[in-house]
Amino acid sequence: MNLRTVRRKYTSHLMSGLCLFAVLISLVPLGFILFFVISQGISSLNLDFFTHVQRPVGEMGGGMSNSIVGTLIVCALGGLFAIPTGMLAGIFVAQNAGSMRANMVRFAADVLNGIPSIVIGLFVYAIAVSPFKQFTALAGGVALGIMMIPLIARTTEEMVLMVPGSLLEGSLALGATRAYAMFTVVLPAAMPGIITGIVLALARIAGETAPLLFTAFNNQFWSTSLTQPISTLTVQVYNYATAPYDDWHRQAWAGALVLITLVLTCSVLARFATRRLERMQIGR
Amino acid sequence: MTGKKTSVGDFLFNTGTGVFALVLVLLVAAIGVVLCIQSMPTIREFGLNFWRTQVWDPVSGEFGALPFIWGTLYSSFIAILIAAPISIGVAIFISELCPNSLKQPLVFLTELLATVPSIVYGLWGVFVLVPAVRTVQMWFPDWLRTVPFFSGPRNGVSMLSASLILTIMVIPFTSSVAREVLKAVPMAQRETAYALGATRWEVTRVALHYARVGIVGAIMLGLGRAFGETMAVTMVIGNNPKMSLSLFAPQYTMAAVIANEFTEAANDLHVSALIEIGLVLFIVTFAINAASRMLIWGMTHQKRQTVAMPVKVVSEQAS
């Protein structure tokens, strides 16, 4: 073995080592963040947190029951707007795959996905808040819905395209129209994957703060009205974290723990479900 | 082909879904148009001076957005400078080097990092990262602090904290796109290199060379993300509209100023000014996304194209 070969071999090992190092570096923050959120959050979490609303400055205790419910309401609204729109748009792209218009829609979805959430907040403020001179839960839902549409459209498209063409061809051969085949054969086959995608999208928008700042705003009282400002976990954590009170900081950590548990549980469950499904499909 | 069977139902189905697809396209257009209309007052009042001047004093009606542009560009470029090599390393390790049994768990962990909400990064930044940065600043020797990069107050909230948190947030995103791109490199490329006696790293370099355009796209997408990141940056950058080269100085970004001042805007002009900042953010991220998506599409669709090309030629000759 000459020197050159040895050098090449060691370069190879060295670079592999560097790549492994990069992986470790990228995972350190995850460990740090989870450690702090869990250790700081657990000590501030109690039953009051889930059953009480915020207390004014100076009074200890209180909770975020209104924010938890608010987050659920706003996310549900977002889903209500985005799921039908996103799915139908995704079906359209899959149906016309490869055509100019399908590519255009896909491109729009990718671009919309990349637009900063704060800009979407501004847009919704302009169309749904400023005309009515009122921050509303509904506006928050619209903002989150706009963020969710491209995510759902892309998953639907991918999942529909993953269904074997023979299924569609079989039903067409039996005399089904394309629409009928789509709704009775292809879509049911793609549904598990689409639902996973929807859950992942919901988990992502549940963690959004920026688009809610000037749409849903915040509310320190219990409110489930769609035409009133509503409190959400994310905005509440933001307000508490940037305030100068220790008790509020504790509450912020507890809020972050609840939020991260909600978001991570959803996405972990969804991912495991997909993996199970993939395995089942391979097994078939 | 004649006698192609179409039904009214299919036509309705395609138009019906098409309408919703159109909603998606129109939404992007609408965001641009609405922001443009809403920012007209400041565009008319200040024109290009809005972007050239440095004084931001909403109460006295002075709006110069240069410090925000500077802050956004500076923080994002530092972040991407650190994040790019790490992300590429992560992508290479996962797609080229690591044993199969490790692949799934690693993908899972990086995806977990991407699902952590930005506000949680911000909270962690305020209470863990900022004090850590402050310690570094305290420890920094005085003679080094005369260097413009390290001058400024020692209170932790700074450009450095913002860049670090952006780095952490951009890595999972960029590395997952880069991984997708590497996945699209045909196996034959690697097998050929192995057959010629290449080492593992040399094979990886072949794959990287093949995927270079797509990887540039992945990095650009990461940059786009960094430009638009709001909450975490707002919480750690210090929110001070003063341009400075110093990593230790508190500064401000475009997204942060919108988040902080919009609900408490002093007057209509202030609102319009903030919306104009949003408009520019929209245009910039639109351009970055459009460009990088094209790069990535070109890359991941290459394989299909080379297969499809000859078929096309044949069909043209036949017709």
Image: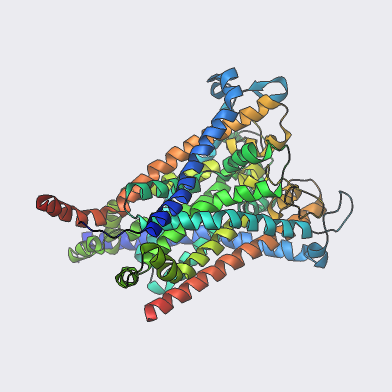
Where does residue A112 sit, x and y in percent of width and height? 49, 46
Where does residue A138 sit, x and y in percent of width and height? 68, 49
At a point 36% along the width and 68% down the height, the residue shown is: A176
What number of labels is visible?
0
- Tell me if I can see residue B108 in this picture: yes
Q: Nearer the viewer, residue A43 or B22?
A: B22
In this view, the residue farthest toward the right is A59
Q: Quadrant of the N terminus of chain B?
A: bottom left
Q: Nearer the viewer, residue B118 or B209?
A: B118
In the rendered view, how is the structure colored?
rainbow
At a point 58% along the width and 59% down the height, the residue shown is: A202
Where residue A128 sits, quadrant-wise, is top right
- Tell me if I can see residue A64 in this picture: no
Where does residue A80 sit, x and y in percent of width and height? 60, 57
At a point 46% along the width and 75% down the height, the residue shown is: A277
In the rendered structure, the answer to whether residue A278 lies left or right of residue A221 reads left
In the rendered structure, the answer to whether residue B232 lies left or right of residue A178 reads right
In this view, the residue farthest toward the left is B317
Where residue B240 sits, quadrant-wise, is top right
At a point 52% along the width and 20% down the height, the residue shown is: B48
Where does residue A212 sit, x and y in percent of width and height? 66, 47
